[in-house]
Amino acid sequence: MNERCWTLVGRRQGPFWVARRRRPTRGGPASVEFDAAWVLKREEDRGDVVGFYHTHPAALPEPSARDVRTMRAWTSSLGKPLLCLIESDGRPAAFRFDHDRSDGVNLAACELLPQGMVVVYDKDRETYEDGQNVPA
């Protein structure tokens, strides 16, 4: 069983990240590569790259040391927080990387929906884009 990877494109709406998986790739049993040039172009053109989704077929759904290094580099490169979603045993787990020193914050809830849609609840981000609190 080999790892798979997708780039996540979408946006954050208050405490929710809403994204779609794009550009699937396959790797080896413990690593996967993706089209970095496509990610950079997509971000430059649309500004909607929100992270990466990949599988850990034979490991726990938590970031490996390589995942942490990769996410730190991407947050630094894109200059914004990013999601790292890791699927193991058919269930995704979500981690938010805020900057190039982040170890990743485990987020409360993550769902993979039909057609590659992903919704993540980020309780630490319970504000609208304008900074107002989300109503109860």
Image: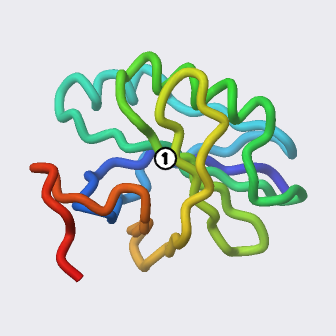
Residue 77 in view, yes or no: yes
**The quarter of the displayed image where residue 94 is located:** bottom right
**In the picture shown, does residue 38 fall above or below 7?**
above
Q: How many numbered marks does the figure carry? A: 1
**In the picture shown, does residue 115 fall above or below 40?**
below
**In the picture shown, does residue 58 fall above or below 40?**
below
Q: Where residue 130 sits: x, y (%)? A: 10, 49
The front one of 25 and 122 is: 122
The front one of 109 and 127 is: 127
The front one of 47 and 35 is: 47
Q: Secondary structure at mark 1?
A: strand
Q: Residue at x 23, y 82 (%)?
A: 136
Q: Where residue 33 sits: x, y (%)? A: 65, 32
Q: Residue furthest left?
A: 130
Residue 18 in view, yes or no: no
**The quarter of the displayed image where residue 1 is located:** bottom right
Q: Which residue is mark 1?
A: 83
The front one of 15 and 116 is: 15
Q: Residue at x 56, y 51 (%)?
A: 53
Colour mode? rainbow
Q: Where residue 79 sits: x, y (%)? A: 36, 22
Q: Residue furthest bottom?
A: 136
Amino acid of disc 1: Leu
Q: Is residue 101 left or right of residue 113?
A: right
Q: Residue at x 70, y 55 (%)?
A: 55
